[in-house]
Image (spheres, rainbow, N blue to C red):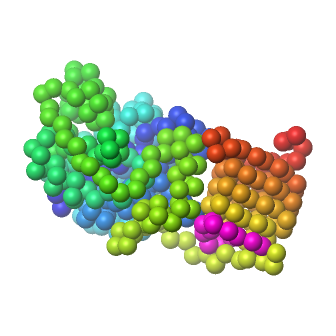
Amino acid sequence: MRLVAVIDAAVKKPGLEDLTMYRTTASVPFAGRYRLVDFTLSNIVNSNINAVGVFASYPFVSLLDHIGVGKNWDLDRRKDGLFFLPVSQKAGGQVTVGAFAALEEHTAFFEKSRQKYVVVTTCSTVCQIDYEEMLDAHIASGADITEAVSRDVGLNSYILAKSLLMELIQTYREKKVISVEDVVKLKKAPYSYGKYEYTGYYAIINSIESYFQASMDLLDSDKRNGLFLPGHPIYTKVKDEPPTRYLPGSQVNRSLLANGSTIEGTVENSIISRAVVIKKNSRLDHCVIMQKSVIEENCDLAYVIADKNVHIEEGVVLRGTPEKPVVLRKGERVSKEEVR
């Protein structure tokens, strides 16, 4: 009950535009059955934080549909709970975490909260951070603002007193700063700064390449076990779908598959989301296929990211590289003639 959380879901990541044309970064699918926001929300509730403000900018329909009133994270409460706080296009769309212009539009959220401290975070860092432990370190250090880091790499999470955050919201224009992250990077006087060292697995997703690498990390059992920890579950929106069906002729090696899919082809080193169809004689290697996509017969795909509802027609061959995977945008239809 010491912390209130701010999830800055209005942060734009220019390198992720192919996946964020119709959604926020927070609602980008990840690990087959999750969205990026699931990891942030789960860290928050696993840290016994019951009051969360999600500051989101357009297009946020997908995010709102996914998190709803927070029921799947036990945040649908009479007191505290999850507050969805849309921000204007003028205030949203910053590339920096904790933009004061966005927070300024919902100061009532902070005025009504009873907690003394605020954690400001975003959804582009996938990790298993314990904010209670971070708050203890913040109080012990006596710093005004504490930043979570891993070997000096910033993890986009900050803790400060609510009174200081309100002061910054009221004075950011005269101080010539734009966000909490900006204040920390500039080490603005007269504040003092501390660091909380996080030692677990993490991935910062700010480009297609980093998204692809973080997805492939999950095929490594050590890294996967470092993210999905016993006693620290990752919660997501519950969907009642049947198990994945593996039809005669299908082969699956070193891959993660969510439920509801139908597999007739060969899948290796890949992440397959819910309700995907992969037809016979098609082969996928190092691919990320999002929900409800269809791969017709005799396709050969390597290093491909297919967003939701992509339809790949019969006989298509697509080959990317680890450094530059092929990205198919949401709802795209690809034929053999188009890729010649």
**Residue 286 vertical position relative to residue 274 in the rendered view, above or below:** above
Q: Residue drawn 43% across and 33% down?
A: 95
Q: Which of the image's four quarters has the C terminus?
A: top right
Residue 191 drawn above or below residue 32: above
Q: Could you tell me if residue 331 is visible in this image?
A: no
Number of marks drawn: 0
**Residue 216 sits inside the magenta stretch:** no
Image coordinates for residue 72, horizontal then vertical, percent: 42, 68
Along the horizontal axis of the image, is 250 left or right of 286?
Answer: right
User: On the picture, is 232 further left or further right than 252?
Assistant: left
- Quadrant that contains the N terminus: bottom left
Magenta-highlighted residues: 250-261
- Residue 168 percent location from the top left of the image: 20, 33
Asked if one can make out residue 44 in the rendered structure from this viewpoint, the answer is: yes
Q: Which residue shows up at 32% across the image and 54% down it?
A: 199
Q: Is residue 275 left or right of residue 33?
A: right
Q: Residue 252 colored magenta?
A: yes
Residue at point 14% right, 32% down? Answer: 191
Give coordinates of residue 315: x percent, y percent: 88, 54
Q: Nearer the viewer, residue 188 or 64?
A: 188
Q: Quarter of the image holding residue 254?
A: bottom right
Viewer-nearest residue: 291 or 92:
291
Asked whether 302 or 332 is in front, the reply is: 302
Q: Which residue lies at the image location 90% right of the left edge and 43% below the top edge? A: 337
Please state the horizontal and vertical placement of residue 211, each as a whole percent of the image.
55, 47
- Side of 144 relative to 59 (left or right): left
Quadrant hosting residue 258: bottom right
